[in-house]
Structure formats: structure tokens, C-alpha cells
Amino acid sequence: MLTSSDRLKNIIYRATHPEHDSQFSLQYWRERILGVIYLTVAVFGATAYLPSVYLSIREEIRWLAFFNTLGYAWFLYAAFTRRIAFKTKAAVLLLFIYVLGVSLILRLGPFAAGPFWLFIFPVMAGLLFGMQVSLVCLGLNALTVFGFGFLIAANPQTVDFTLPNMVAKWWVISANFILLDTVVTLSLAVLLRGLKKTLDRQHQIQMSLEDKHAELQTANINLTREITERQRAESELKSSHEILLTVVDSIDADIFVADMETHEILLMNRHMQDNYGGDRSGEKCWRVFKEETAVCSQCPVTKLVDVEGQPTGLHLWEYQSASTGRQYLNLDRAIHWTDGRLVQLQIAMDITELTRIQKEKLNLEIQLRQAQKMEAIGTLAGGIAHDFNNILAAIIGYTEISMEVDRGNTQLVQYLREVMTAAHRAKDLTAQILTFSRQAEVEPRPMRLGHVVREAVKLIRASLPSTITIEEIIQSKAPIVADPTQMHQVVMNLATNAAHAMESEGGQLTIELDDIDLRSEGAGIEGLAACDQAVQLVVRDTGKGMPASVRDRIFDPYFTTKAKGKGTGMGLAVVHGIIKSYGGEIQVESQPGQGTAFRILLPVADALRPDADHDRPADETATGAESILVVDDEPQIVSLLEIMLASLGYRVLAFTDSVKALEAFEANPREFHLVLTDMTMPVITGQELARRVLQIRPGLPVVLTTGYSEQINEDKARRLGICKFLFKPVLRNDLARVLREALDEACGSQIPQSIH
């Protein structure tokens, strides 16, 4: 039901949004009619336009053909655009009707279609603009037909077709024309004026009904409120003690009424009686509730009335019970009792759980902010990885070229090998940064865990204080099936937690990796009953350890014992999920003061896939003689690729501008056998360049390289039609192999798909 404020809002809305009542506006219907006229002429006008133009050209009335063409073009444009105002469209329509009518009379005589157009001229003016404009148009019509009569009288050869007594007949025709035109125009104008009054009256009636409805609703609300107030007052004055108890006993809160002067308890609800050992009515509230010997120091009675003894309204305050430790929100006010005196009414609601929920919500908000920070760090790491990999590509590439050029200089080659070693370490460091920031995709594959453990230890060693030492015992040779990124995350989380446990007093972090025979372990390991061999990872610290109550919850999401801002409570939950997803088992052993040991068991894989990245002998480098289009926005990379590919026998056309590269390809798409492009480039990315190139020449092999990109991976690249996908920095032998495979396999023949 509407209140007075709602009614006012409706009035303001109708005033500021006239389209709300558009159906009651004559202008609304005029615009609708004009739109129908324009649309009808635009759609069906060709039936009149084409014969008229044909006849005009045949009769050599070329200006009339031009005028008809111009008019029809206007109607076509104006019918389908909203940019032209109503008055402009209506005025042009009237002008077109009048000019066409006059032109037809002057050219084809009084018995052609001209009088029909002049007849409709004031009628349409009255319909679109009202009576005043229609009267002006009637006058203009009268001047036109009478003027034409004078013109015939003065020069009968004005028209090609004449009749006996032409002038007299024209005056009779003109008089009847003006009379009928006036009758129709004025009738339509009167009809429109009556319609406008009817619409206005209907609008006023509707507005009046809405106002009356709003008034009735307001009156109904006020009446309902008055009745409710009266019923409440009568209930307070007339209801019995039993009815009052029925109401207050149904509320799950402590409710009592006490005399404001004597502090004698007058009423306790059932909930409060259960908490304080029965009905304590008649006793002092400070003795029953606080076990005090006098009035409580924080008694709210003095705040419930003003200096004149009148109630001040609701008073809220919180209180924690010393006996139960529960938190209460107290609502106190002064009310008139059944005998007319002012008494204290208190409702005490237990908000212990609400307070706990609010604290948990605050903790979740803190965890969310921490997660957002980690996401920002991951984005930053991706950007750094992209730029750093481009730098490493130049370093590794030019070093490889230098080693090829100066093979006879043993000392220089040795130095260059050291540069390559350092560059590969930098490459591995970039991969570690991406792993730490969780930017790598999950790709489980056969792998040896020892390499991941060593890299994780390198990464964490620099962040540990000197009071913590690391002992690394890696003896495992067996492979497992897992994603290296996730396993790196597991080791980092466990090692970081161990370091936190020892940061105050120092200690030793031990990481062990070995192979075990599960048959000797007995049947107590869940999830690994079907396996005989497993890889065991143990992360042990000499920290303060954990009690059983904490140990039982460490894998719960968002559970953490770290100080505010030092942990999200998700680390061990993530570790648990990763290990379980690979069919493994995780165990924890910890006692207060005796440190903690996490033991992870993962099933051994059947075989380890050979790593082709570094095992290809130098003398197996693949070569070719094809023409390759190279695109990269880094000049150093472009120069390097030109040298590399030229040394492999390929013909190279290189660009640092992807737009110019596309233009060169469009100019001669059959010149190139393969396109080698970077992913992240200004204006046109490598992904977009590949799409356009394959549209022009489907089946062309395209190889995409990137230092790092969230938008593309190997699967998306293949769906685009890109046959090979490489991460920078790329070694010379790897590049040669990939290019040769792409050219020999014709892998670009697949149909590209859209990537969403």
C-alpha cells in the first residue's frame, strides 16, 4: 500500500517522465501517424515512384523525375532514422505535398493528380500541426487554385489540355475544391480537437483516480495504524497477566519488568525463569541478576527518563555475564505499567553466536584481501616472466650462435658454456617464480620429484633467517605422475609452514625424499593398498609442535594458528587436496615441544617419459631451405632469429611491426612456407595475426612463441590452427626441430576454431 511519500514520488515521476502517459498525448499519436506515413511511403512508394519517373522521362519532364527521386530518397532515409525531429519531418512532408501538387497542375493540367495532392495538403497539416496551421494551408491552397485560374484566363496556353469555357469551369471546380477541402480539413481539425479533449479528460480522470487511490491507500494505512495503536493500547490496559505471559514466554530472550524506584521485579518471562532458577518476582533485580548488595553501578534506570520524568526512548547497551561468559545485547525503555506508573522493561538477547559470526566474517574478509594480494603478485610475476624470458632468449640465442661460430676457441667456448649455465639457471628461476605465483597450468605427467624438491629448496633458502638450517636428503629415483607446478607448491607450503614454526627460536628444516616398499609398511596406509612401491617425501622441523586439538584441524580450509596477516588458512588444505588428487596419502606427526613431521606418499609411475628438451645431440640439428616470415616486437629477438634461421639454411623475412608483417603477407601469401610469430605484440597480437594469416591461406604452418601469456596455451593454440607452441627462451636445436616438424607434418592444415 502507498504512503504519502510514495504518492509524491509517483507524481514527480509522472512529471519528469511524460512518456509514462504517452498514450494520453495527441502529440504521441501524431508522431505515430507520421511514422506510419513515412514507413508506408518508403515501403510502397515505389509503386507510384517508378511509373511517375518513367512518365516524366518519357514526357521529357526531367525536373519532375528529379523531384520525385529526391522526395522518395528523403522518405526512405527519414523512415528508418530517429535523428530527425518530428516538426522537421512533418514540415518536409507538407512541403513535398504542396510542391508536388502545384508542379503537377502547372505541368499536366488541372485534371491530373495535382488537385488531389493540394486537397490533402491542409488535411495533413491539420492532422500533424492542428487547426491554425491547417487554416494557413487552406489559404495557401485558395491562393494557388485561384491564381491558377487567373493564369488560365490570361493565357489559355498555360496548359496543354483545355475544355470549352475552361476558365468558367475552373472557377466552379476551384470553388467546390476549396469548399470540400475546407469542410474535410475543419472537420478533421474539430475531430482532433475533440479527441485531444477526450484524451486530456481521460488522462485527468486516470490521474484523479490514481490520486484518489493513493489517498485511499494513505487513509487506509493511517486508519490501520490508528486501529493498531488503539488495539495495542487497549491490550496493554485490559489484557490480563496470563495473556501478557503468553506473549513474552514465546520469545527466546530474557525479558523482565522492574519498578524504577524500588527495583522490585514485576515480571519475568519463561526463558529468563529457566536461566535464573524460577520466577523471582518480588525480589530486587540487582540481587537476582548480579548478586549485588545494592543497586548496580551501571543500572540504566536513570537513562530511561528525562529530568521531567518522561520516557527518553530505547536505550541499548551490551553486557557480558561473568558467570556464563555469554554476550548480551540489552534493550531498555521506560513504559507505563497497568496501574499507570513508569517501569523498566528490559529485553536481553544472547548475541554470543552473532558476535562469533561477525568475527569470522572479518577473518574471511582479511583472507579475501590476502588472496587478492596473491592474485596481484601472480599477475606481476607473469609480466616479469614475459619480459625476462625475452631477455633470456637473446642471451641464450646469441650465446649459442657464438659457440657455433668460435668452436675452435676452446677458452671462449668454455666461458660461453658458463654463460649458458647461468642463463638456464635464470630460466629455471623464472619458472619458479611462475610456479610460486600459481601461473602455470596443471599438467600431470611422469616426472621425478627430486628435481622439484631441489628447486623449491633453492627458492626458500634465501628467505630463511640464519637461525634456521636446511638439510636436504634426496635419494629417490622412481618416477611419479604429477604436475611439477603443484608439487612445487606442496613442497613450498610445507617448508614455509615449518619455517614459521621455528622463526622465533630457530632450528633445523629437514627434507627427505626416498623410495619405499609399501609391502613392508603393513596395511595401515589408506589409498595406497593397490600399490607396492611409493615415493616418500618427509618435511620435518624442530619447532614448537602442535597439540592434538590443532593437529586434527590443520587440513580444514581457513583454519590457521598464525598471527593476523601471516596466513590465509588455505595452505595445508591445498596441499591435502593436491596429494589426494594424485592418489597419495599425507600424514602428520607432532607433539608440543617436539617439532612436526609431514609424511607424503605418492604411488610410483610405470615409466618416465624421456625429456627431449636437452637430450638431442648437437649434430642432429634439423635444417631447411624454406621461406619463413618472422614477427616479434623485440628488435633483439628478431635479429637473433634471423641469424639462427639463416644458419639453419632458411630464407627469412623479419618484422618488428605486426601490422607491416601482415601487409607483407597479404601482398604475397604464397611466398612463405611458415610463419614464426611472438604472442604479445602491440596492435595485432600473435594470436590475431595467426588467425588472419590462416584466413588468407588455410593450412599454412604457424609457430607461436611467448615468454608468458594468460590468454593462450598449447590447447588453445591448436584450436586456432597454430601447429606448434613454444615458451621463450627457445634453444637453437629445439627451434630447429619444431620448425622442421611443422614444415614436414603440415600441421597447419587443421581448420582454425574461434577461441572464447
Image (cartoon, grey):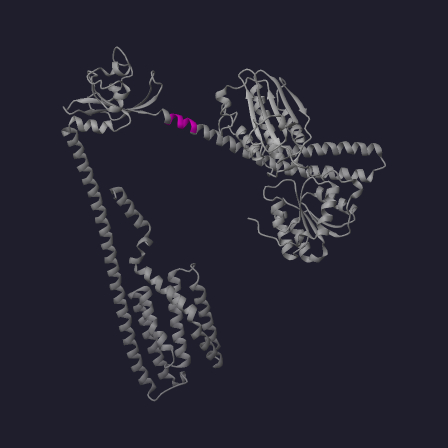
Rendered position, 515 above or below 40: above
Residue that sits furthest to the bottom in the current view:
164
Is 156 in front, or is 540? 540
Q: Position of residue 65 (x, y in %)?
A: 47, 75
Residue that sits furthest to the right in the current view:
408
Tally of numbered discs: 0
Residue 90 at least partly seen: no
Quarter of the picture containing the N terminus is top left
Residue 376 at least partly seen: yes
Which stretch is magenta? Answer: 354-360
Quarter-of-image position of residue 580: top right
Is 129 in front, or is 589? 589
Is 604 in front, or is 164? 604
Q: Position of residue 642 (x, y in %)?
A: 75, 46
Rendered position, 168 above or below 368: below
Is 145 included in the stretch rendered in magenta? no
Question: Which residue is drawn at the image coordinates 80% and 37% (left, top)?
Answer: 403
Quarter-of-image position of residue 204: bottom left
Quarter-of-image position of residue 576: top right
Residue 271 placement, left or right of 674: left
Rendered position, 314 above or below 89: above
Residue that sits furthest to the top in the current view:
293
Residue 447 placement, left or right of 23: right
Q: Position of residue 543 (x, y in %)?
A: 57, 18
Residue 142 placement, left or right of 533: left
Residue 292 placement, left or right of 97: left
Q: Position of residue 182 (x, y in %)?
A: 28, 73
Task: Provide the major secondary structure of the magenta segment.
Answer: helix
